[in-house]
Image: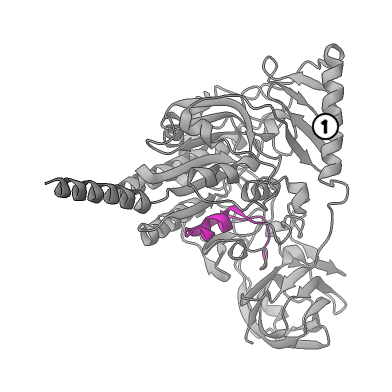
Amino acid sequence: MRLFYFALILFTLGSCTMNTALERQPNVILILTDDQGWGDLSYHGNTNLATPNIDSIAYNGAVMENFFVQPVCSPTRAELLTGQYHPRLGVYSTSAGGERMNLGITTMAEVFKSAGYATAAYGKWHNGTQPPYHPLSRGFDDYYGFCSGHWGNYFDPMLDHNGQIVRGNGFLVDDLFDHSMEFIKKNQDNPFFIMLPVNTPHSPMQLPENYWNKFRDKELKMTYHGIEEEDQQFTRAALAMVENIDWNLGRLTNYLKKVELDENTIVLFMSDNGPNGWRWNGGMRGKKGSTDEGGVKSPLFIKWPNKIVAGTSFKQIVGAIDLLPTLANLAQVPLADSLDLDGIDFSSKLITGQDKIVDRVIYNHWQGSTSLRTQNYRLDMENRLYDMDSDIGQTKDISESAMPLRDSLITLKTKWEKEVNIKTQHKERPFPIGAPGYDFSHLPARDGLAHGHITRSNRWPNDSFYTNWESLNDSITWEVDVLKPGTFEVFLYYSCKPEDVGATIQLKLHKENISTVISEAHDPPLIGIEKDRFPRMESFVKYFKEIKMGEITVPKGKDLLCLKTIAMPGDGSIDFRLLNFKRKK
């Protein structure tokens, strides 16, 4: 009998050990909105809109009340992916190559992938277009979206799906959530990490009719507090976009419940910078682009049922740099000792519900302007000091009454700027072609340099195309770096008026060149005007036609790639959008 009980105990202990070993790591879904302000949520008291699904993450999870990102898109994305401040990473711009992170930096996706997670990103990447800067090169198994900083069309747009140029399905935000749920369906038996960086409420202000109809004539009872003028029609469009995000989040939440994964999925919600217009934002000073509080304070809601204490909130200052170590520790995913992180792990707060304040400083920087935030104070770009507990709007400079504190913070700012090399970070790099392991390299008009009469369709390059090509002396060039020699098929995306058919386009790289005759007119109208709810500042776009130019064999190394017209029967040549290099061997 004793032997029986002993065996039973061993079996029970063995079963417990086995269950613990087989306990699945949590899934992680990180939702990142684009240009949404802290104040664009009903949770934060904005009665102009209703965001019940986003708010439910806060009510059923934890709220970081003092969460800080960077003033614009690319720096924030780089920081949350790496746990390091963006000047260290070589990110100094939002376009033309300056948005790319240095190579050799470990990303969050790589950390989770190395731990056996399936990884995906759906939406706006904004940290590099060509491998090895592309999402597939940074740890993601599946990518669908656009790699540029903004896009000119949110309905059935041209997109990148794992390097293939495809056309989207319907309204882009809806489409991105659809892809996320499809990925969950395929990977529901294994842990997964999904980054969902949606493209709204960034302009152009396009959204489905039913959301716009609700806000078109809506009275806004909460408005911007400062002397700058709020354009309420722009605000209405932005808030309507946020309500669409909220509806999609509700769909995702319901799907997680349907497949019984909600209990073991960590869901995070945040924005990448302050609001993209003057609108209600809790009385804070600054908007997108500013290093003041309103330009860098973002919501951060985190939910993990039965693990993170529901309904808790924390005053500890935290930043995008903290997400990598925090999420890794929550998921029990190991981090290499060699990682040099600026961020801290605040996971213990989320699990225990205890808000023991850690004394630290968070830095915000953009285009030569640096401010810093302590738990209670902000030193702004002009070294004015504000008590953020009593003056969230930064209206009273307290420097004279707190000179020792101000001087000590100036010293910290100066030391940080030197440490991260902000004065030497603007290192221009060529655009890579033929990265080992990848059979595609996209060279968009955004990354090229026009010569002669050719002009961009808009001053903001991210979604632009080249037009006004009217001379044989005109050209477009790219500084490129062929990372692995080989033979490539080259595809050109163009439009051409009927009277300009017959133009011969030549591509030259190193000592090789190929050319093709434009034998078919393709002159589609500009799109977007009929969908815009507010006049845009970005380029209008159109659907371009793909044509194979031929095959070109090039050696490894840096060189100048040149696109020219060498025969022009009409008065003009093509409008140009994109080159796609596909490796053959």
Percent across and percent down for residue 310 are: 42, 29
Quarter of the rendering containing residue 504: bottom right
Magenta segment: does it hold 322? Answer: no
Furthest toward the left, the residue is 1
Furthest toward the front, the residue is 2
Q: Bounds of the magenta span? A: 106-131
Q: Give the side of residue 160 with respect to residue 575, left or right.
A: left
Q: Is residue 372 above or below residue 503?
A: above
Q: Is residue 299 above or below residue 465?
A: above
Residue at left offset 61%, top offset 31%: 232
Quadrant location of the C terminus in the rendered image: bottom right
Total labels: the figure holds 1
Whether residue 118 can be seen here: yes
Percent across and percent down for residue 350 are: 50, 33
Q: Give the side of residue 428 with respect to residue 158, left or right.
A: right
Percent across and percent down for residue 530 are: 56, 52
Which secondary structure lies at badge 1?
Answer: helix
Percent across and percent down for residue 398 are: 81, 15
Quarter of the rendering containing residue 237: top right
Kind of residue at disc 1: Leu
Whether residue 368 can be seen here: no
The one nearer the camera, 49 or 371, is 371
Magenta segment: does it hold 116? Answer: yes
Q: Is residue 543 above or below residue 184?
A: below
Q: Residues within 10 Å of mark 1 (few under 14, many from 20)?
A: some
Q: Is residue 486 above or below residue 479?
A: below
Quarter of the rendering containing residue 35: top right
Q: Which residue is mark 1?
A: 412
Residue at left offset 38%, top offset 37%: 305
Q: Give the side of residue 17 with respect to residue 308, left or right.
A: left
